[in-house]
Amino acid sequence: MALDTAKKQEIISKFARSEKDTGSCEIQIGILSARISELTQHLKQNPKDHSSRLGLLKLVGQRKHLLKYLKKTQYERYAKLITELGIKDR
């Protein structure tokens, strides 16, 4: 389940550090979070869809690694990002 282009552009413009920034950690985490929330809603309606559940777990793992990297390298940006996305700090 991919995001549509308009939604992706909205996320990019929200988290971009500069005008041409399209792949920073913040943007990648924002896109992954949007995909995770869509898949979560899908799985609430379709609880037996195990292949989507595996995809969700992979996305959560990717986001976890990116968050860990951002926390280790630039804590201020990490703290700002998790408050905007509503992600718990563990």
Image: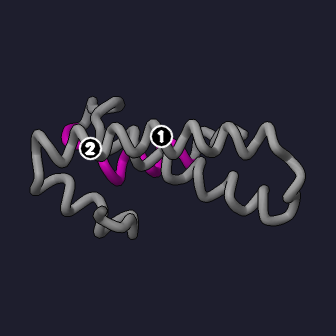
Q: Label 1 crowding class (10 Å Cα cut-off): few <14, some 14-19, many 20+?
A: few
| Residue 12: % across, % down | 39, 43
The quarter holding residue 88 reads: bottom left
Nearest the viewer among 88 and 90 is 90
Quadrant placement of the C terminus: bottom left
Mark 1 or 2, nearer chain start: 1
Vertical order, 38 against 17 (above or below): below
Amino acid at dot 2: Lys
The label on residue 29 is none
Residue at 42% across, 43% down: 63
Nearest the viewer among 30 and 8 is 30
Span highlighted in magenta in the image = 7-18
Please give the residue where the numbered disc 2 appears in the rendered image.
68
Please give the residue where the numbered disc 1 appears in the rendered image.
61
Residue at 67% across, 37% down: 55
Could you tell me what secondary structure mostly forms the magenta stretch? helix
The quarter holding residue 23 reads: top left
Residue at 51% across, 46% down: 60
Nearest the viewer among 22 and 30 is 30
Residue at 58% across, 45% down: 6
Name the element at disc 2. helix
| Residue 28: % across, % down | 40, 38
